């Protein structure tokens, strides 16, 4: 039965992601059609076509590899100066057909020329005013932002539903003077935390001072301690090292003296920058706190998520490299490394098949997993790099700025921004993303992350 539940979890996650992809593409297609653009294809997946149906001028379908989707909007690339119309011909129906030059010299020029030629093969005699590149800049922004905005909207409504009903649980220190839950026996470098103490490791200052679990710290270097946040600052700022610690043990006031070790550690959970700070080696008792809230609370939480996601995007290549090292056995895979849809499916399967998780916890985990993927996909697609949606948005905004400046200065209209000139860079970016995607998929198969850690 466990295998059945595992498969059910994977299926639920994959279906949810495919629905999200489909809605993402609708976010592009619907405004494109509303603005008069011509959409010839709407597909979920890549590779060989599994099923398709022609409805009007648009072919709807599903492809074999469920790792994305696309809509084909005619006229994304304008004819450039290096690829002007050579001549016109009349087809069998008597329509005038424009022929676009397909041959150029130079590798990059030929690359751009081929892309234009492929684009213009779809342009019919009645499509001249329906081409995407001719749309006003703000319509282009709406069309291209529609897809990732849908993903972020999906994430918002899922988060809102969870926060408003189940709430968001967090662990925080108990209020009041901190009672110690654990004492470190030795000082380990931050990067090696979690391993057992070795004989060569220096003893932790708190252990050396005689502190034990259950003690309540009441003062630090003569300063009365009111809560954990205050004590943490006192420890980190203790530059001279000497520390006189007052504490209660079973109702008896006691005191111990030690020297705080200066270690390179992050100052908080939200700032991972390593700094030289004082270290004592104590962990306070904590409690689980549940916060609930509506749309404003959800937006506030998503604001924090945005900051963390941007940090994750900046470090994404480094973290993917870490996964590659784990694949070949150089390093262990980090618990905070990114995962692909394969890894997400595995986590979903483990959650649903886990016998000790209550049903409510399983549902919440799956919802948060789907919402998290949607939020990341939305943010990722807003990156101002072609071939991502953000790259097209940046091109449209640049077109607006360029034309606006020309009008202000009384100069001729500079015309449309030619995104085709950035295609060589777009292919490099796409290749990099493809490699990272493959590394993550292989990593999720070979060295997968697990709920068990």
Image (cartoon, helix red, strand yellow):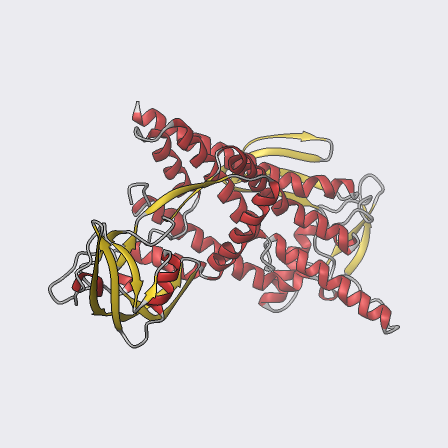
Q: Position of residue 131 (x, y in %)?
A: 77, 49
Q: Position of residue 368 (x, y in %)?
A: 47, 39
Q: Is residue 188 left or right of residue 375?
A: left
Instruction: Look at 61% across and 47% down and name the residue there.
Output: 148
Residue found at the very far left of the displayed protein:
199
Q: Position of residue 275 (x, y in %)?
A: 37, 70
Q: Quadrant of residue 396?
A: bottom right
- Please identify the quadrant where the N terminus is shown: top left
Nearer to us in this view, 63 or 314: 314
Instruction: Look at 13% across and 67% down and name the residue there.
Output: 200
Nearer to us in this view, 175 or 344: 175
Residue found at the very far front of the displayed protein:
252
The correct choice, above or below, for 279 with respect to 12 in the image is below
- Residue 44 makes an appearance in the image: no
Q: Quadrant of residue 22?
A: top right
The correct choice, above or below, for 403 with respect to 70 in the image is below
Q: Position of residue 48 (x, y in %)?
A: 52, 38
Q: Is residue 362 left or right of residue 134?
A: left
Instruction: Look at 34% across and 47% down and name the residue there.
Output: 286
- Residue 355 makes an appearance in the image: yes
Nearer to us in this view, 12 or 225: 225
């Amino acid at each position: 039965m466990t295998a059945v539940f595992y498969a059910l979890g994977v299926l639920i996650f994959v279906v949810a992601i495919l629905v999200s992809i489909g809605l993402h593409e609708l976010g592009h297609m619907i405004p494109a059609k509303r603005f008069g653009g011509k959409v010839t294809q709407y597909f979920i997946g890549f590779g060989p076509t599994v099923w398709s149906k022609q409805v009007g001028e648009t072919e709807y379908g599903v492809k074999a590899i469920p790792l994305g989707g696309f809509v084909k909007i005619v006229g994304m690339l304008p004819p450039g100066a290096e690829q002007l119309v050579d001549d016109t011909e009349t087809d069998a129906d008597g329509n005038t057909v424009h022929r676009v030059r397909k041959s150029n010299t130079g590798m990059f020029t030929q690359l751009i020329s081929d892309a234009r030629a492929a684009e213009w093969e779809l342009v019919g005699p009645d499509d001249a005013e329906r081409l995407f590149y001719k749309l006003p800049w703000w319509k282009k922004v709406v069309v291209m932002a529609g897809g990732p905005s849908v993903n972020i909207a999906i994430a918002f409504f899922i988060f809102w539903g969870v926060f408003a009903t189940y709430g968001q649980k967090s662990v925080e220190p108990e209020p009041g003077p901190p009672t110690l839950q654990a004492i470190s026996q030795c000082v380990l470098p931050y990067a090696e935390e979690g391993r057992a103490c070795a004989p060569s490791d220096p003893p932790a200052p708190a252990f050396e001072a005689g502190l034990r679990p259950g003690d309540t710290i009441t003062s630090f270097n003569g300063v009365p301690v009111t809560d954990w946040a205050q004590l943490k600052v006192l420890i980190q700022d203790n530059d001279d090292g000497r520390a006189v610690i007052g504490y209660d043990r079973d109702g008896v006031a006691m005191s111990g003296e030690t020297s705080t070790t200066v270690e390179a550690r992050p100052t908080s959970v939200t700032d991972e920058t390593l700094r030289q700070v004082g270290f004592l080696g104590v962990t306070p008792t904590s409690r689980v706190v549940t916060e609930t809230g509506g749309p404003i609370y959800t937006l506030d939480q998503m604001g924090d998520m945005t900051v963390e996601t941007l940090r994750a995007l900046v470090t994404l290549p480094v973290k993917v490299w870490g996964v590659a090292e784990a694949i070949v056995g150089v390093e262990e895979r980090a618990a905070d490394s990114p995962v692909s849809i394969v890894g997400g499916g595995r986590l979903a399967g483990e959650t649903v098949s886990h016998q000790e998780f209550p049903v409510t916890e399983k549902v919440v985990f799956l919802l948060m997993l789907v919402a998290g993927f949607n939020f990341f996909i939305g943010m990722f697609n807003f990156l101002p790099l072609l071939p991502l949606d953000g790259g097209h948005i940046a091109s449209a905004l640049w077109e607006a700025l360029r034309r606006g400046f020309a009008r202000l200065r009384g100069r001729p209209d500079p015309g449309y921004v030619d995104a085709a000139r950035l295609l060589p860079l777009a292919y490099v970016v796409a290749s990099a993303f493809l490699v990272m995607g493959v590394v993550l998929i292989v990593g999720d198969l070979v060295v997968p992350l697990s709920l068990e850690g």
